[in-house]
Structure formats: C-alpha cells, structure tokens
Image: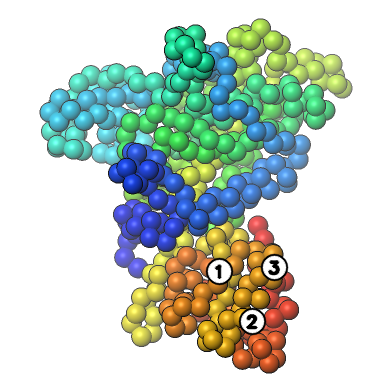
Amino acid sequence: MEKLTMEKIVNICKQYGFIFQGSEIYDGLANTWDYGPLGSRIKNAIKDAWRKRFIQENDNSYELDASILMHPRVWEASGHVGGFSDPLMDCKECKTRHRADNLINDFTGDSRGDSMSHEEMVKFIKDNNIPCPKCGKCNFTDIREFNLMFETHRGVIKDDKSIVYLRPENAQGEYVNFLNVQRTMRAKIPFGIGQIGKAFRNEITPGNFTFRTIEFEQMEHQLFCKPGEDMPIYEHYKEYAKKFFMDLGLPESKLRYHDHEKLVFYAKAACDIEYEFPFGFGEINGTHDRTDYDLSQHEKFSGKEQKYLDPETNEKYIPYVVESTVGLDRTVLAVLCEAYDEETLEDGTIREVMRFSPYLAPYKVSILPLIKKNHSDKAKEVYKELSKYFMCTYDESGNIGKRYRRSDVIGTPFAITIDDETINNNTVTLRDRDTMKQITLNLDEVKDYVLNKINF
Ligand code: GAP
C-alpha cells in the first residue's frame, strides 16, 4: 500500500459514514466533526473498553459523570483562568495567526518548542527563518498569550459575575467530587475516580482532522494515593495505558513514550504516549503525577477541607494524584489510520479493507442472501435473530463479490452467505474479512462463533 495520507483517511471517513465535517451544509465550522453511524459505533466501543480496563477491572475505581459547567472558581483554583493559554503570533504579511510552539515543532520534526520560553521561541524562529505556513515569509509579531477556555454566561445578564466556562478538561470534576465519592463508596486510599466526557478548548490552529478540535472527549482517571507512594503508581499507569492501546490494535512499534523534561511547577512527573499518525507522532495519552496541587488549591479556594483521614493510622493528609488521560477522538483516529489497508489481489485488483479488531468493528456480521428471490426471506430471519446479540448488516444488492467489498471497506469481520444449503441443511458459509477464507458452520453455531471473537 502507498503511504497513507490524512486526506485519504478524511475521504474514506466521509464516504463510508465514519466521520463527517461539522455543519457541512453551511460549509462547515472549522475544527468540528460529526461522527456518523460507523464512527459512533467505534467511539462507543472504545469507551466501553476504557470502562472495562480503567473502572471495572481496576481495583477500587469508581465512575463519575460530572457537569460540563462548573463553578467559575474551580477554574481559578485549577490555574486555567490565569494560565491556560497558547503562545500566538500573527504573520505581519498575510495576517494569519499561528502557535509559536507548533511552528517550531513542525519545522524541527520533534517537540522542542514545548519546552522553550517566549524569548527562546522568538529567537529560534528568527534564527532559523521559519516561514509562515500560509505565505512563506518570516515576519511575525511578538508572542501573545491567548486563553483557550470557552466562556459563556448564565442567566439573562451578561456581566463578569455571570461568566461560566465550558470545561477544558474532565479532571476537575473528579477533584471536586473526591470526598463525595470517598465517603459514599467508603473508599480507602489508594482509590480511583474516572470519567468519560466532553471537553472544550478554543484551539485556533487547524488540527489534522480530529486530532486537534475545539470540542472533544477525554477518558480521564485520577488515582488518589498517599504522598510518597505515587511514583510506582505513576510507572504502573504509563504501562497500563500503553497496554490498553495495544489491546485496541495499535502496534507497539507505532507507540512511543515522550517523557516531559520541562514540567509545570506543581507536577512531579509527566509522560505522553504518542502514536505514529500519517502526519507524524502525536499525543494520545498523558500520565501525570499532579502531587497534591489540585486538591490543595480547591481546599484553599473553597475553604472546605479536602483531607483524607486514614481509618487505620488516623493520619490526615491531602492525597497525591496520578492522572491517566486518554483522548478519545485521537484514539478513534489512530484506530482508523491503523486499520486502513489496500490489498492487491491475485487478479491485480485492489481491495480496500479496514482491519479493525473484531471488538471494534462497527458491524460484526454481514448477512448476504446468495440469490435475492430465493434466499432473502431466510436471510432476513437470520438477520433478525443475530441482531439480538450484535450489530449486523443485511445486503442483497449486486453480485456477491461486490457485497464482500462493501463489507470489507467498513471493516465487518465476518460475512455469512445464505443459500440453498441453509434452507435444506441449516448450514451457512462464513467468510473471514482478513484471510477471505470460508468455513461452513451450522446456523446455530454462528452466534457463539462470533461472540467468542468480539470480546475485549
Ligand atoms: N486533565 C489533563 C489534560 O487535560 P491534556 O494533555 O491537556 O491533559 C489530555 O489533554 C488528552 O486530551 C490529550 O492526551 C489528548 O489526547 C486529548 N486532547 C487534548 N486537546 C485536544 C484537542 N484540542 N482535540 C482533541 N483531543 C485533545
């Protein structure tokens, strides 16, 4: 297969119903995307997989579903009002706006821009004559900080007192509910709180399809632990997150750790997991040792004690937090990029196939009557029965080869053909998407055969 491009992935997503441009009939709203019938199936499967690993199988972890709108003081306490901003420069020639760190990272092919001060960035851009991506000139303004939080107003009066923010991360919902969850679940430290939900950031730079958007979903897990017991937990979550991605079908060879050298002042350690997208490596997860910073800040700003009382030792302390955050949209994108394949067949034709793991595939089985007028009644009966257990498609139009191709390109792992043998002997042929090999099964065996293959 030729090297995959983002353009190709965008086109496939649009053509087959994975992801559409947001508000497309109005020419789109930049950096917004709508998940179609197939994309939303994948997204939901990834959410369920995360729930299984990070809540269900994770000792002492609890799920939360907190509000998107939170008290504005939350964002003062967290530091987002004062410091959640991007370093922006305007091109004096063509008047486009750019993130200084991105200009540097795109130029160098690594992430050195992330750890530079404003002065260092300006100097680096000038010294290396880094051009504006739009007009090619190197003539920028100085850097200005631009806050990424979306503001809105509650109530009818639009003044400073009515400002509320759309949350830029899920984590704060977990911190402000730390004691609620601890008390109601009678949780003993170490314990975790996780949630899946939307976050919003007013990103001004366009972002490689769904990689950088203004509205996205995060799957975040905060592990509350005793100070001093944090580092082994931090190391554990780095590996745990990587294993999670590999279980979703992302190969280890395309994943890498990026340990942060320059840390925010309160963090003890931070590491990203990056996946190799067609445009290069990009972050899909972060593991952060956030110390007792967030809970201490909330204690200070709310005036409510946020300490944990150890029932065995009677010690009272503010726990440390190890965060593991996964970008859901970026994970969907990685899964899509990884799955796409073009296979040259023996007759020289090319088949497009999405090689999703059966667990992630939007549909599990295509049900194909061999001859419409003879076999469609039976096929519809089979479709109705199997749809009770997993998502199926029914396709009776065109020759069987064309129907296999349609099934392959949306990644359906199995196709069963209903023919005379089904009617006379209750057997079907089941074709495997990847090997294209066919086996004969008794119709009654199909359900369990498929269920066994689609576990996470
Ligand atoms: N609570 C910590 C936190 O929010 P982050 O590194 O800013 O950390 C976590 O974001 C994850 O959210 C990232 O690893 C990334 O996968 C995803 N993410 C961040 N900004 C995004 C954006 N603009 N569009 C899509 N995903 C984004």
Instruction: Please tell me whether mark 3 or mark 1 is closer to you in this view.
Output: 1
Q: Quadrant of the C terminus?
A: bottom right
In three-dimensional space, the C-alpha distance between marks 2 and 3, rounded to whole angstroms, equals 24 Å
Q: Does the residue tagged 1 have its C-beta within 8 Å of any atom of ligand 1?
A: no
Left or right of 430, for residue 153: left
The answer to whether any part of residue 374 appears in the image is yes
Residue 13 lies, with reference to residue 155, above or below; the image says below
In three-dimensional space, the C-alpha distance between marks 3 and 1, rounded to whole angstroms, equals 19 Å
Q: Residue shown at 58%/81% (left/top)?
A: 376
**Residue 198, x across and y down, in percent:** 53, 35
- Ranked by sequence position, the earlier of labels 2 and 1 is 2
Q: Residue shown at 50%/48% (left/top)?
A: 331
**Which residue was labeled with disc 1?**
393
Residue 369 lies, with reference to residue 303, above or below; the image says below
Instruction: Please tell me whether mark 2 or mark 3 is closer to you in this view.
Output: 2
- Ranked by sequence position, the earlier of labels 3 and 1 is 1
**Residue 167, x across and y down, in percent:** 52, 26
Q: Secondary structure at mark 3?
A: helix
Instruction: Tell me the tag on residue 452.
Output: 3
Rendered image quadrant of residue 68: top right
Q: Quadrant of the N terminus?
A: bottom left
**Which residue was labeled with disc 2?**
378
Amino acid bearing label 3: Asn
Q: Secondary structure at mark 2?
A: helix
Q: Residues within 10 Å of mark 2 (few under 14, many from 20)?
A: some
**Residue 346, x across and y down, in percent:** 38, 84
Q: Secondary structure at mark 1?
A: strand
**Residue 40, x across and y down, in percent:** 52, 51
123 or 426, which is in the foreground?
426
321 or 361, which is in the foreground?
361
Amino acid bearing label 1: Thr
Q: Residue shown at 52%/84% (left/top)?
A: 372
